[in-house]
Image (spheres, rainbow, N blue to C red):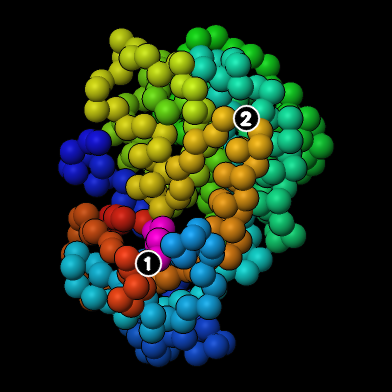
Amino acid sequence: MEPLSTMASLAILILLAPVSPAQNGEAHSAQVVKSSPTLVIVPTSVRSQYGDPVRDLDAVRFRLADNGQEQSVYLERIENEPLAVVVLIQTGGAASSELGNYSKLDTFVGSILGASPSKLALVSFDSRVRQIWGFPPRVDGLDYALTHPTGGDRGAAIRDAVRCGINLLQNQPAQFRRIMLLFSQEKDSGSESSSAEVLREVARSGTTIYSFTFSRDSGSRKNHKDKPSSTTAGELATQSGGEAARFDGDDELEQAMSVVREDIRSGYILSFHPTSPTPGLHTITVQVGQQTGRLRVLARKYYWLD
């Protein structure tokens, strides 16, 4: 893992105008929500010790600390939330023997989008970004591109592809949650972008990354441009509040994506106004009452306040 000083830059902050209190009364009060121009948004999912989603929690069950100081939390359950999704597909390096696993990718991605308003884009890459489908109004051609990727060279420019995906997401409507689905080997090979540059861009964009890496990662050899501490695909995902999964074959990929679908479609949106809005890095910890040891909580670990 990288030193905290580097990984800490993956602080995700979304600054939004104050939202109205939830109809179910789970906000602490309207005055609290309107008391500060800065609202920190923390998409959160909770699973049982058996991996099942936990959907029936209310705001008083959550404990959220900002730099160790407990905050008053506002809660909304995710329900038909608009999504802007970028799919990143590695076609070079270790992916050359994995392309057959993408034959059902259009169906898998469609199940994540569901019936809610959504936008979909696609980026394929090897040692460089090769093809970009940038949120087209019609997705029939994009569906074909998802399931029929063309093999590439020996590279895997993961960091460059993530930056490209972020650029596509930047111009999407503010009410759309930004999601990135990354299908790749674990380690970068050939990117021009540094780890610090990518982490900074992720922090600015408010993107949640879900990483799906090949179990047989023959393409993870070090490249002359890589440093031993380079951020991996899994680290990008977990530090952004997303999930990192490995798969071997399309059956395992389908299973991994079904877990991610539950996280995206049945989680929570926590938000709070920092009681100490000092500029710089803030560390977030989210727990569910005293049951943290029996529940798995996925949430962003940092945010940055200008």
Q: Which residues are magenta?
A: 295-299
Whichever of callouts 1 and 2 sits on the residue coming sooner in the sequence is 2
The residue closer to the viewer here, 231 or 31, is 231
The residue closer to the viewer here, 251 or 100, is 251
* Image-quadrant location for residue 287: bottom left
> How far from the left and from the top, in percent, is residue 183?
55, 32
Q: CA distance from mark 1 to mark 2?
A: 30 Å
Residue at position x 31%, y 55% from top?
301
* Local crowd size for mark 1, using a 10 Å CA cut-off: few (<14), some (14–19), many (≥20): few
Which residue, given by chain and number where applicable, does mark 1 sit on?
A: 294
* Image-quadrant location for residue 289: bottom left
* Secondary structure of the residue carrying numbered label 2: loop
Residue at position x 32%, y 32% from top?
231
The amino acid at mark 1 is Arg
> How far from the left and from the top, in percent, is residue 77?
54, 73
Which residue, given by chain and number where applicable, does mark 2 sit on?
A: 249
